[in-house]
Image: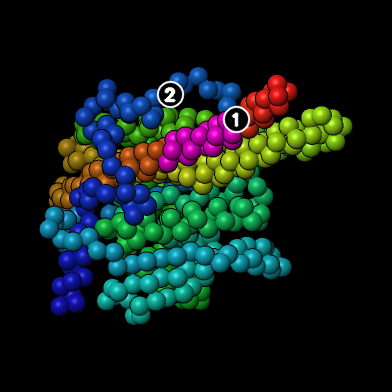
Amino acid sequence: MEGERRASQARSSGLPAGGADGESPGGGTPFPGSSGSSALLQAEVLDLDEDEDDLEVFSKDASLMDMNSFSPMMPTSPLSMINQIKFEDEPDLKDLFITVDEPESHVTTIETFITYRIITKTSRGEFDSSEFEVRRRYQDFLWLKGKLEEAHPTLIIPPLPEKFMVKGMVERFNDDFIETRRKALHKFLNRIADHPTLTFNEDFKIFLTAQAWELSSHKKQGPGLLSRMGQTVRAVASSMRGVKNRPEEFMEMNNFIELFSQKINLIDKISQRIYKEEREYFDEMKEYGPIHILWSASEEDLVDILKDVASCIDRCCKATEKRMSGLAEALLPVVHEYVLYSEMLMGVMKRRDQIQAELDSKVEALTYKKADADLLPEEIGKLEDKVECANNALKADWERWKQNMQNDIKLAFTDMAEENIHYYEQCLATWESFLTSQTNLHLEEASEDKS
């Protein structure tokens, strides 16, 4: 029975589930997808002017993903083919819960680094226990991401936060930076756990359960340096050849990714600029309350009024700080995550093209008899299966990712809009209360003068 249950879970992987990655439950009209490049990204949330060259924004680590260093490998076993099928009547029950917390600094004679505690709770039979606790550093997350890309080259792997925060942000071991990274790593692991295929990856299981020495030993079992160099050379050669006949649906997908990347990067820049200006406004407004208090000490007739103004400014200042916190926690991380997703998608398309380019080169060799004609048909057959498997995996994951992206971005902007409305209502009520009290005071004074 346990074997049947695990096989049933493994089958629920390829086709879109229609929901978010366990992060946001939104809904609404999907973003345009594969219906042609003319309909790409017409949603108002991404319809922005391009003339924003003067925006100041944090740059990204360009080494986040080395597109050409990937080995175009794709499992072609019967199980991997089964993993591309999802039965609609199967319940989507969550049985893996992951928490990333308690960052801890480690100082050695060679380096200083941060580890994070990872607690995993599960009811899956393939795990030896129902709960695990391990500590991992950022390099371990990078290793996991690389292994997932190697095993599933055309699935959309969730992005990791950049290795370093660049100028304009906090220092590397600042508490704010560590907390921001902890949240991002928590989301990274939970997105994998919620993915119908990646969640059953063996390296993912080892990452969650193995002690430090066991993980280190497992890492050493990977391909050797010469093997990795050979894979890299083949990948670069495939990318240089390019793809002569990319299917139309993948052309549309590629056009969508390019346009989406432009728009989401622009939104990221604008969001960062808004936050910077909001911070400057907040810092300046904090000075006004104390100034009015000092002013009241030298204006005997205006003491009460000036103190009331200072109180109003203080309440508006607190409301502004709360809105800034909402912007920093609800909108900016979501937008920037999809900036990283856009880079990831470009890498996925490149790996798909590399697999097809390898097939094209073999077909061309057979056509012009550039190699052993007896061996080529068998190789071509295997490559055709590999390309079909890669294409099916990407198409299924693409629809799932688009739905999640739409839900996440819609929810982030909706929450931000509601937060802004609440903020302005608070500020308006504060000043209306002040004006009402002053009006009533003047009316009372006028009434006393008449009497």
Please report whichever mark, 1 or 2, sits nearer to the chain's N-terminal start.
2
Q: Main secondary structure of the magenta part?
A: helix
User: Quarter holding the N terminus?
Assistant: bottom left
The residues tagged by marks 1 and 2 sit, at their Cα atoms, a distance apart of 41 Å
Residue 374 in the figure: left or right of residue 322: left
User: What residue range appears in magenta?
Assistant: 415-433
Tell me if label 1 and label 2 are in contact, CB under 8 Å.
no
The residue lying toward the viewer, choosing from 213 and 289, is 289
The residue lying toward the viewer, choosing from 416 and 254, is 416
Nearer the observer: mark 1 or 2; the answer is: 1
Q: Is residue 71 visible?
A: no
Q: Quadrant of residue 36?
A: top left
Q: Is residue 180 visible?
A: yes
Q: Amino acid at mark 1?
A: Thr
What residue is pinned by disc 2? 48
Label 1: few (<14), some or many (≥20) within 10 Å?
few
Give the image location of residue 225, x and y in percent.
47, 60
User: Quarter holding the C terminus?
Assistant: top right
> Residue 436 bears which disc, if any?
1
Q: Amino acid at mark 2?
A: Leu
The residue lying toward the viewer, choosing from 341 and 408, is 408
Give the image location of residue 110, x and y in percent.
69, 65
Q: What secondary structure is marked by label 1?
A: helix
Label 2: few (<14), some or many (≥20) within 10 Å?
few
Q: Is residue 151 above or below residue 370?
A: below
Give the image location of residue 351, x and y in percent.
34, 44
> Residue 416 bears which disc, if any?
none
- Taking the spot 50% from the left edge, 50% from the top edge, the residue there is 161
Q: Is residue 411 magenta?
A: no
- Taking the spot 54% from the left edge, 54% from the top edge, the residue there is 181
